[in-house]
Image (cartoon, rainbow, N blue to C red):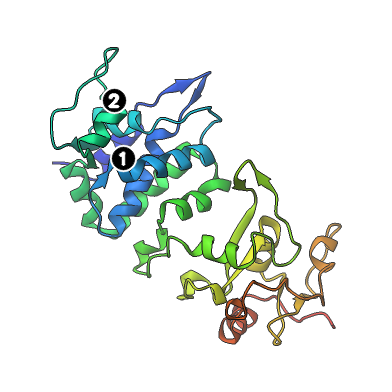
Amino acid sequence: MADLESVLSRLDNLRRGRHRGEYAPHKPLLLLYALGRLSEGDDLVAYRDVDPVLRTLLRDFGPPRQTHHSEYPFWRLQNDELWQVTSKGQLQSRASNKDPKKSELLNKGAVGAFAPDVKEVILADRRNLTTVARKLLEDYFPSTLHEDILDAVGLSLDMARGRPKRSRDFRQRVLRAYENRCSVCGFDIRLGEKLAGLEAAHIMWHTADGPDEESNGLALCVLHHKAFDLGAFTVDVDLRTIVCSQELSGTMTDWVLGYHGKGLRAPQSRRYFPEKQFVEWHRASRFRGPPRDL
């Protein structure tokens, strides 16, 4: 009978491939994706569905490769006593090892799921899922990537406190609304196909029951997201003008203070503009007033 400690111990002993001295994050990313699905009530993960998702996750959060193979972690995770795979027929192995070919997983409808005892532990308490997710994030990824990964797999750690689950596509919708640019400074750097350092900020925080709607979101670069959440600046009552705090000081304040009194970059549609109730929450609950004169 598994308990939380035994599940965490299995994660400690997770076998991972190694390439040029660097461990590959294939299995941790697959587990985080499966946790996201499980949090939404989907305990079965079809290989056909996970293949494009996992390859995208590996492209964005794994070491650079010409080709990313999702079939290896999907099959080999069974060796760690965390996962099981079923299919509609016997899977033919490769000539070189016991792994089935990717075509076999696709053609025979292979489905993965957490091992029954692991699933039972994860679902026994909301906090268990959060504990497992945090361990995977902290053991295998730098903290700067944690929120991006959670967004990508549709997982919210707020669920442990009984809050509504974060929308899987909130980030995508908000960034699209602002045409993939920071609504303050216009920052829009890309690394290959991936946006680098651009985030979707809740105006009224998700932890304060702010909804996952474009009108409660701003596309912000990492610096302006942090400054906004800390209350270094807010949006004026006109819902358009950037207002900085009198508390803001330091040698690099121009990167924030330089936008004081300027307008937010407009989203594509009027319906995406910040709503008054959310801006009022931020001004009352987060902004470190008093404001500077406009």
Q: Residue at x 63, y 41 (%)?
A: 192
Where is residue 51 drawn, in percent x and y? 36, 40
Q: Quadrant of the N terminus?
A: top left
**Label 2 Cα crowd, 10 Å radius (few <14 / some 14-19 / many 20+):** some
Secondary structure beneath disc 1? Answer: helix
Residue 126 visible somewhere in the drawing: yes
Q: Quadrant of the C terminus?
A: bottom right
Write down the quadrant of residue 193 in the picture.
Answer: top right
Placement of 222 over or under 78, stated as above or below: below
Q: Amino acid at mark 2?
A: Lys
Q: Earlier in the sequence, mark 2 or mark 1?
A: 1
Q: Is residue 39 left or right of residue 186?
A: left
Residue 13 visible somewhere in the drawing: no
Which residue is the site of mark 2?
101
Which residue is the site of mark 1?
8
Viewer-proximal residue among 189 and 145 = 189
Where is residue 19 drawn, in percent x and y? 49, 20
Residue 18 badge: none
Q: Is residue 125 left or right of residue 247?
A: left
Placement of 27 over or under 184, stated as above or below: above
Q: Residue at x 65, y 51 (%)?
A: 197
Write down the quadrant of residue 256 in the picture.
Answer: bottom right
Secondary structure beneath disc 2? Answer: loop
What separation in Å lies between label 2 and label 1 (alpha carbons)?
30 Å
Where is residue 203 drawn, in percent x and y? 58, 73
Q: Amino acid at mark 1?
A: Leu
Viewer-proximal residue among 266 and 131 = 266
Placement of 3 over or under 151, stated as above or below: above
**Label 1 Cα crowd, 10 Å radius (few <14 / some 14-19 / many 20+):** some
Q: Residue at x 38, y 48 (%)?
A: 133
